[in-house]
Amino acid sequence: MQIGRKDLFWNYAATSMRILSGIIVLPVVLRMFPSEEVGIWGIFLSLMTITALLDFGFSNSFSRNVTYVYSGAKELKVKGYSVAETSEVDYGLLKSLLLAMKRYYGIIAIVFLIIFLSASPFYLSSVLAQYSGDKQPIWIAWYIFGGVLAYELYTFYYGSILQGRGLIKRNMQIVAFSQSIRIIATLTFLFAGLGFISLVLGLLTGSIINRILSYYVFYDKVTRTNLRNIVPTEITSKVIKIVLPNSVRLGLVALGSFGIHQAIVLISPFYLSLPEVASYTISRQLVMFIYSFGFTWLATFIPQLSHYRVRQDYNGVKRLYIKGTINMIFIFIVLGTALLLLGNYALDLINSKTSLVKPAYLFLMLLFAFLDANQYIAISTLLTKNEVPYFKSVMLTGCASVLLLIIMFNYTSLGVLCLILAPNIAMCAYQNWKWSIVVIKEINLQFKDYIFVMKSFYKGGNKQ
């Protein structure tokens, strides 16, 4: 498995398209919709994380095990990994993994629909209690949105198997193209006069295109031929049991992350006005764009990291970790400065009805996002060992974030600042520094290693 410049380029391109979808659509949304509807759309976007929550860590576990199989592993382990002696792919083992994915994601899609349909009348009614506009389009968009999320859950593993196989470039090309289709579809529906529903219909169109292309790229002629008549080497239930322990840990991590990053947005309408929620949501969306760019470099090479683990190439692991960190620092300095200096100016140019939070608040959001991105790089490196030592701390941090937020809302008058401080105080207490130290010790990272990599960074390029 070899991941290089083209994979990295397309990962940045795909990330750029995600951002571009926001940059192109967002000004139209900010001009056409009042702050109340912008705030409601922010709640929709927060609910999208329920997909990752119900995945419960299986996508990462499946993807990592697909990488092991394509690296030559002949068996799957609950903990750790089997060292590969050859690079030959065991298609029987691969077929076992694919069947397990299909069963698992079919089940959770059904579970999601049951939960969504049961909770919607209560939750959305509460959110719309302070909404002054026509509520019917919001309800229609809400239920279409639920269907989109269920479909994405059912096909959630498509991206994972492409990543696991090392088809980073193809996967990112698909993401870039489907995001382009989403932009075109959303703008078409908006200018056709469909209003708020246009945002959801655009999302649905892009999602369908993404999944169709992903299916046909992974199941190429060679793969179909090798999988067609081969018998799975493991029964589906056994494969799920193998990936279950670490998946549960990653699921708890997702649950904790949900509490840290998304639950606070879902809670906020009960304490803040919808325009305040809109201001925070737009600010956070722009900060998260920078966050996404910050770890894109390392995210591209995650399969390569797993490959190095299987091949016991620890210098390769160290090299990727350092390069990922350097790229992340550079991205935050450049784009963070641009957002602080030009963010509200850009919104004024498009006559936005919604503004960013105060500059001091925005700086805090960027600072905490930087610490979170650094943590992501560390835990991603640890995860390639097929171990999840950080799941308990993330769970506790998530619970502490929600509890602290509720306390701050009820006993202080800090308003939007509560949304920024509560989760990040909880993160800084342990999570934001612990795992970086663990990785530094585990790979025996020293200052001279940074100097060596920085000197060779541009000489060797990004090809690993």
Image (cartoon, rainbow, N blue to C red):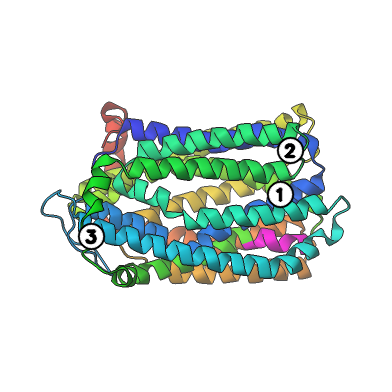
User: Which residue range is magenta in the image?
Assistant: 263-271
Label 2 close to label 1 by CB (< 8 Å): yes
Q: Amino acid at mark 2?
A: Val
Relative horizontal placement of residue 249, taking residue 451 as reference (left or right): right
Q: Which mark is residue 93?
A: 3
Q: Secondary structure at mark 1?
A: helix
Disc on the earlier residue, 3 or 2: 2
29 sits to left or right of 425? right
Determine which of the numbered discs, if any, sits on residue 111 in the image.
Answer: none
Is residue 444 at least partly visible in the picture?
no
Q: Quadrant where the N terminus lies? A: top left
Q: Nearer the viewer, mark 1 or mark 3?
A: 3
Task: Give the residue at x 41% y 33%.
Answer: 10
The residue most toward the front is 229
Q: Nearer the viewer, residue 45 or 336?
A: 45
Q: Is residue 441 above or below residue 171?
A: below
Q: Nearer the viewer, residue 196 or 318?
A: 196
Disc 3 to disc 2, C-alpha distance: 47 Å
Residue 209 in view: yes
Q: Residue at the location (28% across, 52% down)?
A: 67
Residue type at numbered disc 3: Leu
Sequence order check: which comes first, mark 2 or mark 1? 2
Crowd rating for badge 3 (residues with CA inside 10 Å; few <14, some 14–19, many 20+)? many
Q: What residue is shown with label 2? A: 29
| 174 shown above or below 94 | above
Query: Marks 1/3: CA distance?
Result: 42 Å
Q: Position of residue 455 (x, y in %)?
A: 29, 31
First in sequence, mark 1 or 3: give its number: 1
Where residue 41 is drawn, which disc sits there? 1
Q: Front-most of 404 and 243?
A: 243
